[in-house]
Image: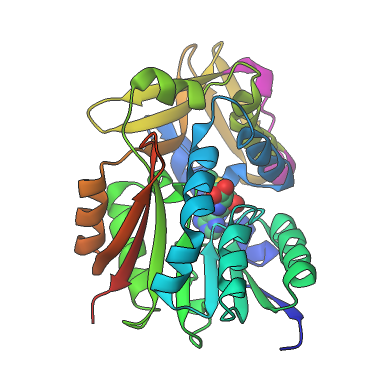
Amino acid sequence: MTPSMTVDVHVTAEARRAALEADVRTGLSRHPKSLPPTWFYDDRGSELFDEITRLPEYYLTRAERSILDAHAADIAAASGADTLVELGSGTSEKTRLLLDAMSASGRLRTFVPFDVSEETLRRAAEDITGAYGIEVRAVVGDFHRHLSELPVDGHKMVAFLGSTIGNLAPGERRRFLDDLGATMTPEDHLLLGTDLVKDGGRLLAAYDDSAGVTAEFNRNVLSVLNHELGAHFQPEDFDHVALWDEEARWIEMRLRSRLPQIVEIEDLAMQVGFEAGEDLRTEISAKFTPEQVARELRGGGFTVDASWMDPARDFLLSLARPDP
Ligand SMILES: C[S@@+](CC[C@H](N)C(=O)[O-])C[C@H]1O[C@@H](n2cnc3c(N)ncnc32)[C@H](O)[C@@H]1O
């Protein structure tokens, strides 16, 4: 196969802007205030996330990589896929272990990285085209809206790694699985990475590291609003807060206003008032039990074929098939 690379852009600048405007209008008018985590990921946000993955406290990436190190060949064989689709692909660093295994089995033909963050996606797609000499069909898309734009040909394995599914609320997870299943045949597979429930102290440390990188990542969403919507946030006027909600079984990241303030968002002709100590929720990161993952997959029309954990049982990779 001749190496080639294409980039399909489904999130145009206008569409991205319209979605950001809608999310900011709704999220900053409601009580409590909230924004979807998608808006962290401009170029700087993607760089900061990459730094987070290397922090000593952020065990998630190391745990998931260790599973792939040990089992990528089994996963490639069990999926039988010749096409690897990766949702929320970011730098696709860990994904190379899957690409290596599929390539070693002689089956790898196409890689389809899919992400909202265009620059990071383009760089990763170029690197992988060069390194593997395969067909790379990158998709700039939003997995809440553009799953139907995924290529339909090939025998696919769709990887959704990094426990990114935990950033979706339960209802959104169900919708996501329904939409994804509609793009797959019964021979395709979903490879889903999920972070497992564990000691609250370790969970909190992973989202509130001592070097302050996660705090900078969290505040980056305010810089995105400043650059893209002419907002006047002073990021240093907000504290980074991570909370473990034992009942909901998720980590929440919030930005807490240090003082009473009114922030203008020029492009939306909007003024947003914060009381001292008022929170803006920027992310949830749900944690799972293996039984819950299997149950949610079943509810979304998938059956788990196989699953793997790291030796410390911190993280789970599940390989599931859409029901016929
Ligand atoms: C938690 S990071 C995980 C990155 C990588 N998969 C990993 O495992 O390290 C989430 C990724 O999903 C992307 N993302 C966030 N919201 C998205 C959306 N609505 N649609 C598509 N990609 C999204 C981000 O740009 C980022 O690359």
Residue 229 is one of the magenta-drawn residues: yes
The colour scheme of the drawn protein is rainbow
Q: Is residue 235 visible?
A: yes
Where residue 138 appears, x then y in whole percent? 65, 71
Q: Is residue 60 magenta?
A: no
Q: Residue at x 33, y 46 (%)?
A: 169
User: How far across and how far down the image is residue 128, in percent?
Assistant: 72, 66
Please report the residue visible at 58 percent of the width from the left and 31 percent of the height from the top: 218
Residue 75 shown left or right of residue 54 in the figure: left
Residue at image x 54%, y 41%?
A: 61
Q: Which residues are magenta?
A: 227-239
- What quarter of the picture does the C terminus occupy? bottom left
Residue 75 falls in image quadrant: bottom left
Taking the spot 77% from the left edge, 60% from the top edge, the residue there is: 123
Q: Is residue 1 left or right of residue 243?
A: right
- Along the viewing direction, whichever of 211 and 174 lies nearer the viewer: 211
In terms of image quadrants, where is residue 204? top left
Q: In the rendering, at what x and y percent does residue 50 appear?
A: 66, 41
Q: Vertical placement of 303 versus 184: above or below?
A: above
Does residue 122 lie above or below 223 as drawn?
Answer: below
Count of numbered labels shown in the rendering: 0
Q: Can you say which quadrant of the picture contains the N terminus? A: bottom right
Q: Position of residue 83 (x, y in %)?
A: 54, 78
Left or right: 323, with 92 as reference point: left
Viewer-proximal residue among 98 and 207 = 98
* Residue 143 appears in the picture as rendered: no
In the image, residue 264 sits, relative to residue 84, either above or below, namely above
